[in-house]
Image: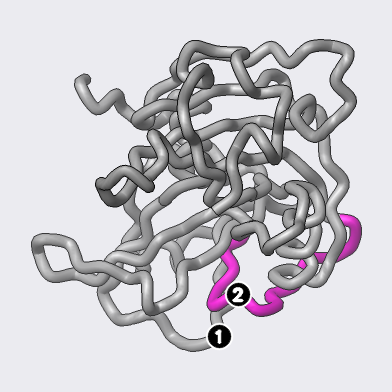
Amino acid sequence: MPDLFASLPALDGVHPLLMGRRIALIGVSVLLRDDDAWYFEIQRPRYWARRPDGLPSVGIGGIGGSLRVGEDVLTALRREVREELGVDVALEMPPHTVLLHEWQVAGYLEVPSSILGPETWLYIVNLLPPQLGGSEMPDALALVTFLGRPLGRPRRGDLFGLLTVAPEALSDFLETPEWPLEMVRAHPGLGLDLASELPPGCVLRPILTARAFRVVMGREPSPNG
């Protein structure tokens, strides 16, 4: 995994949580929208889980993925969008750059105005705990997210599934922490394009980028609240 500050050097030291720490960049994503819809990935079957009540739990995430060796952040993002949706992406300047830590807003980042790199276009920097212990593990993992518009009509590429959320349905989507499959199919503002059927009775839930979006928009309760 690449180092966050090697990939996005202007982030180094702009917040106490970004000072003197080893942070691995696990992926790059985009919250992609046009006049018709917001676009989200439906997680592949190998990542599905089960809730305590036994129902299958399927993740809803952003469009994106990990960096290949030698790729910079924007090259990786554009490659992932082309692979997953068959289009290029035009980044948009977000209203601010939000730093999340343990699924709470930790602050707003001010990248120096002299910087012309991708750091100035970041929407969300999401810090997550490392998954394993040991001396070789970083202090934290990071997923960075941009805001953008597709250049062309998105279609499901190598994704298992694509969820479209109409602009007028975004508030409903963000307000609801879990979506039974039947509710998704019944909602007039939500659409599914799947490579194969989802398991009957499954529940869809926002994860990673989609969950971070809920936090930024004030729809995810505080872990302590």
Residue 44 in the image: above or below residue 6: below
Asked whether the beta carbons under mark 2 and mark 1 sit within 8 Å of each other, the answer is yes
In the shown orientation, is residue 218 left or right of residue 203? right
Where residue 128 sits: x, y (%)? 40, 38
- Looking at the picture, tell me which residue is in the foreground, 173 or 3: 3
Could you tell me the amino acid type at mark 2? Answer: Leu
Where residue 185 sits: x, y (%)? 46, 68
Q: SS class of the residue under badge 2?
A: loop
Q: Is residue 172 visible?
A: no
Q: Quadrant of residue 10?
A: top right
Instruction: Specify the segment rendered in magenta.
Output: 151-164
Tell me which numbered mark, 2 or 1, is placed earlier along the sequence. 2
Marks 2/1: CA–CA distance? 8 Å
- Looking at the picture, tell me which residue is in the foreground, 200 or 206: 206
Q: Pointer 2: what residue? A: 159
Is residue 160 on the magenta stretch? yes
Q: Pointer 1: what residue? A: 195
Is residue 91 on the magenta stretch? no
Residue under the point 27% across and 46% down: 134
Residue under the point 88% across and 14% down: 114
